[in-house]
Amino acid sequence: MPNPHEPRPLLDALRSGAPLPEFPPDAVEQARTLARDAAAATPAAVEALPTPLAEALLEGAVLAGSTPLPEALSRSSVKLLAKAAKKALYRLRSRGVAVPEAPRPATPELPRAPEPEALPCLLTSITGDGRRALLLGRPLRGGGIEAAQVIFSDELGVVELAFNEVTRSSYRKRLKESIEPGFAVELSREEAAAVLAEAVALNLSSRTPFPKDLDTAMRHYGVLPATTEPSVPLPEPEDVKGVLEGHTLHETEEISQWLPPEPELRKVAQKMDEITASPLALTGPQREEQMLQAVRAAARAFFTPRVRKLYGLRLWRMAEFFERTGRAPAAQVARAEARRLFHGPEEPFSRFAERLFEKFLVLAGAQAAAPEPGGDAARPTASPAPAPTERRSPGGLILP
């Protein structure tokens, strides 16, 4: 099935009036007007559009056998657009359309200006609901740095974006405050751009609207939506051992904060209340065993094939985070769990998944043991424990 955001499907959508909610409405309206006769569109008007829409109009020029628009845009300062225009000229030549040769410079080419400094970027670990923060930096002419902080979800894509102009010293300080305590890991600009490209692709597949300025960030960092879905390698024979040790991942600072979604916690709480109120004469150990079996059954019910893939990807990415923060044993266990969760087999069942739910028993027990303001011991209860509140690093990055 073709990608609806490739140039040809986008051009068809512009001409048919199909909705394109992921792009700014004014840009879509302008592109629709130009798409009626893409060959007659002016280069300046096309260059002002988001890159995917501009590439769709280039496609219209190719279909019309017209060379002026791609010829002009092949010299565009927007690198991705210039590249697409050159590709359009090549396609026109292949179809037998006469394409004028690019004029030779009358004077010797001046030495190129040095490439902008490639600043390091940051990526945090993953929160229990699949969110991460990404920090990208771009040098500005005045000597400062444009810092772009992106909050993205592994189900929805980019959900928040903020631009700030900061000094080089404050940018370096922010890096240090996040990396040294292990809140985040350093990425190259190319790695960070790939992370952003994958997140943007999720916006499109989940139909999550682009936050304000996301299109600007994509242009500044040369990002297009990723065209391949993320995956995890196939299981290896020794992964069974890692699966049996999966519960140890919940002892890491990051994953210790993970809990099942609130609706699942409420189901477990209801089951625990039923066990507590059971008319059967159960001893304390018998009741505890029933509760343990109930939460493990809840884990099996929750980890459907879709959820297994979701958590498989989360653990695969956490394995890389553990590796980069010097925790090779945790990375090894996370990779084993990730491969088997993502691909199967389902037995032996994931100890990581069971422990995700078993933690609720610990939290509920801690609530039951906590004294009330009056000083008496609180009545045991199985009500869901409150979800951990959002934390942020000293530099403002969201933390797990």
Image (tube, grey):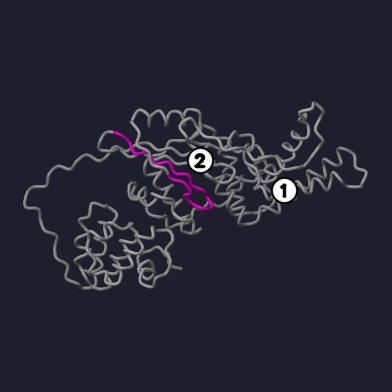
Q: Does the magenta-highlighted stretch encompass residue 62?
A: no
Q: Nearer the viewer, residue 97 or 334?
A: 97
- Tell me: 342 left or right of 269: left
At horizontal 50% and vertical 43% (from top left) the residue drawn is 132
Q: CA distance from mark 1 to mark 2?
A: 32 Å
| Residue located farthest toward the left when viewing the structure as drawn | 106
- Neighbours of disc 2 within 10 Å: few (<14), some (14-19), many (20+): many
249 left or right of 10?
right
Magenta stretch, main secondary structure class: strand
Label 1: element kind: helix
Residue where numbered disc 2 is placed? 320
The quadrant the C terminus occupies is top right
At label 1, which amino acid type do we have? Arg
Instruction: State the residue at coordinates (41%, 43%).
Output: 192
Residue 386, numbered label: none
User: Residue 395: where, in percent of width, then height?
Assistant: 45, 32
Q: Which residue is mark 1?
A: 266
Q: Is residue 312 above or below residue 258?
A: below
Residue at 65 percent across and 48 percent down: it is 261
Splitting the image into 4 quarters, where does residue 118 fall? Answer: top left
Outermost residue toward the right in this view? 281
Q: Residue at x 81, y 30 (%)?
A: 377
Q: Position of residue 282 (x, y in %)?
A: 90, 42
What are the residue bounds of the magenta stretch?
Answer: 144-161
The x, y position of residue 157, in whole percent, is 48, 51
